[in-house]
Image (cartoon, rainbow, N blue to C red):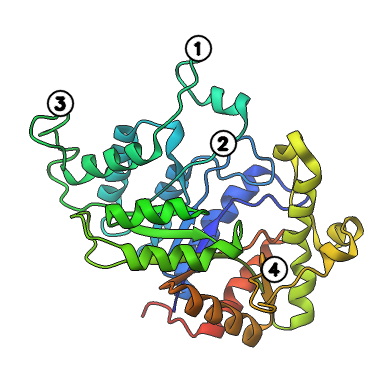
Amino acid sequence: MKLSIVDLGTVAPGTTEKDALADSLETAHRAEKLGYHRIWFAEHHLSRSGASHHPELLIAAAAMRTSRIRLGSGAVLMNHYSPFKVAEMFKQLEAMAPGRIDLGMGRATSGPVLDQALQQNRQHLFRADHRQQVAETMAWLYEAFPPEHPFANKPLMPTVPEVPHTWLLGSSPNGSNLAAGLGIGYCFAGFINPAGAAPALRHYRDTFEPAGFGLDSPRAILAVNVTAADTQAEALHVANSPKGFYARLARAGREAGAVMVPSPEEAATEMSPAEMDEPTTVVNGRWPRFVAGGPTQVRATLEQMAAESGADEIMVQDLIADPLARRRSHEVLAEAFGINPPG
């Protein structure tokens, strides 16, 4: 089982965004030493809880501190950008770190004000055609425009043969159809929609069709919120941070961008008993939003989820407030799965 990380640049209580960004780069460095397969960086705008606003910047910086681990976006929000800009940017990143770059493509709305702030034309808010944007990005990367198309015969970087690996990220069945139809990789956000993960990933596998975009067979990632520690009790305590963050979000309404990830102690004073006791393992066939436990328990839960979904790889999101506890969680997972650091 391959293990990977999606990093949000989590801002620990009492620290700054500068600290969080430095910690993200340290996380990439340590993840490579532990044997993780890839690390992706999130795109969250005007979010006080996470400092990863532009994944491309962290990818470039992390490439200078690592030599093996794959680096990517989780995800570029395609509804805000030109496909040409995205394709050219990631082609350049591929030139800077050959064979190590992943372009993860997704979409999201941050509300009407921020969505408008991200648009060049403020008079008429652009409503992106996600399928068209992803397809056009692939055409730029693989020089796949029809001969009569105005963008044909315009290679991005003619002396760079390498192409970043391409992924579609989603949390609904629609994404599985698009990824399978284009023949690209698919990553499902199980921490957003745990009940939909296995059906979507299985559907992607069943309907995958190669389309000349680098893959002959399906490639699937399951992204899960995971908290691992040396003991079950410690893991459940640390998992109060992600649980408490989601509880705060549920109550924040329009002020969600200002919500911070709480310490486990802060979260314990804010959550209801039901929120505190939310399951962290598969119960009666229902997948949890948060996986937490000691090494044996976490491995068993993640292996069950991978088997039920057909995922090739587990990508860990954590939202652990304390950077030291976050690093220990990554270490425990690596040890539990026996992933091998590079020789």
Q: Are marks 1 and 4 in contact (CB under 8 Å)?
A: no
> Can you say whether 205 is above or below 53 in the image?
below
For residue 282, side relative to residue 314 (left or right): right
Res 34 visible: yes
Q: Residue furthest top?
A: 123
Q: Which residue is mark 4?
A: 325
* Disc sitting over residue 13 in the figure: none
The residue indicated by pointer 2 is: 109
Q: Which residue is mark 1?
A: 123
Q: Earlier in the sequence, mark 3 or mark 4?
A: 3
User: Badge 4 local density, few (<14 within 10 Å), some, or many (20+)?
Assistant: some
Question: Residue 104: horizontal and vertical position, in percent?
Answer: 40, 51
Q: Is residue 172 left or right of residue 113?
A: left
**Which mark is nearer the camera, 3 or 4?**
3
Of residues 191 and 233, the one nearer the viewer is 191
Going from N to C along the chain, the mark reached first, 2 or 4, is 2
Q: Nearer the viewer, residue 65 or 165?
A: 165
**Mark 1 and mark 4: Cα distance apart in space:** 46 Å
Sequence-first tag of 3 and 2: 2
Kindly identify the amino acid type of the residue bearing the numbered disc 1.
Gln
Query: Disc 3 residue type?
Result: Pro
Number of the label disc, if any, that sits on residue 150: 3
Type of amino acid under label 4 = Ala
Q: Residues within 10 Å of mark 2 (few under 14, many from 20)?
A: few
* Residue that extends furthest to the right in the rendered view of this protein: 269
Callout 1: SS: loop
- Frontmost residue, 298 versus 333: 298
Q: Secondary structure at mark 2?
A: loop
Q: Image quadrant for the N terminus?
A: bottom left
Q: State the image coordinates of residue 183 (x, y, percent, origin top left).
A: 27, 57
